[in-house]
Amino acid sequence: MLLGIFGGVYLLYTIGWAIGGVGMQAKAMFMLPAPLYLASMWIAVLAPALWFTAALMLTRGGRDWVRISALVVGAALLVPWPFVVAGGGGAL
């Protein structure tokens, strides 16, 4: 059950990074070329899914508290700040 909750959190993080990245695109274009910004945005969008998968695969044979700790650390590190701060509008 706890893995399902964390899976939902990481899915929401993925959606938050996508919305926040698209919302910031117009404001960030004067600092970065478009291909560089799009590449970094997609890395940020894929990061929660990759962390969730890596945490499950790398802690497969370990104790449950190690897996939960890895998922909690990832949930704390991968918060979609552009979406949280600006509501997806990208007003950073």
Image (tube, rainbow, N blue to C red):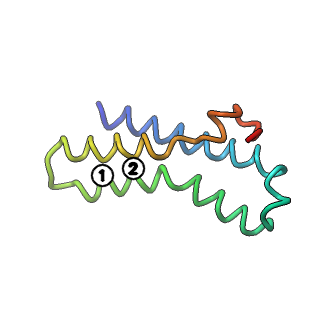
Q: Which of 31 and 8 is in front in this view?
A: 31
Q: Residue visible at 29% across and 57% down?
A: 57
Residue 51 higher or lower than 10, as above or below = below
Residue 89 percent across, percent down from the top left: 76, 36
Residue 17 percent across, percent down from the top left: 61, 45
Residue 10 higher or lower than 25, as above or below = above
Residue 44 percent across, percent down from the top left: 58, 55
Q: How crowded is mark 1: few (under 14 residues within 10 Å), some or many (20 or more)?
A: some
In this picture, residue 80 sits left or right of residue 4:
right
Q: Residue visible at 24% across and 46% down?
A: 67
Residue 72, located in which quarter of the rendered image? top left
Check if mark 2's residue and mark 1's residue have beta carbons within 8 Å: yes
For the N terminus, give its image quadrant.
top left
What residue does disc 1 label? Answer: 56
Secondary structure at badge 2 equals helix
For the C terminus, give its image quadrant.
top right
The disc label shown at residue 43, or none: none
Distance between the alpha carbons at the discs numbered 2 and 1: 6 Å
In this picture, residue 33 sits left or right of residue 53:
right
Q: How crowded is mark 2: few (under 14 residues within 10 Å), some or many (20 or more)?
A: many
Count numbered badges in the picture: 2
Name the amino acid, label 1: Leu
Name the amino acid, label 2: Phe
In this picture, residue 33 sits left or right of residue 19:
right
Q: Residue visible at 41% across and 39% down?
A: 7
The disc label shown at residue 52, or none: 2
Q: Residue visible at 76% across and 47% down?
A: 24
Residue 83 percent across, percent down from the top left: 65, 37
Secondary structure at badge 1 equals helix
In this picture, residue 51 sits left or right of residue 27:
left
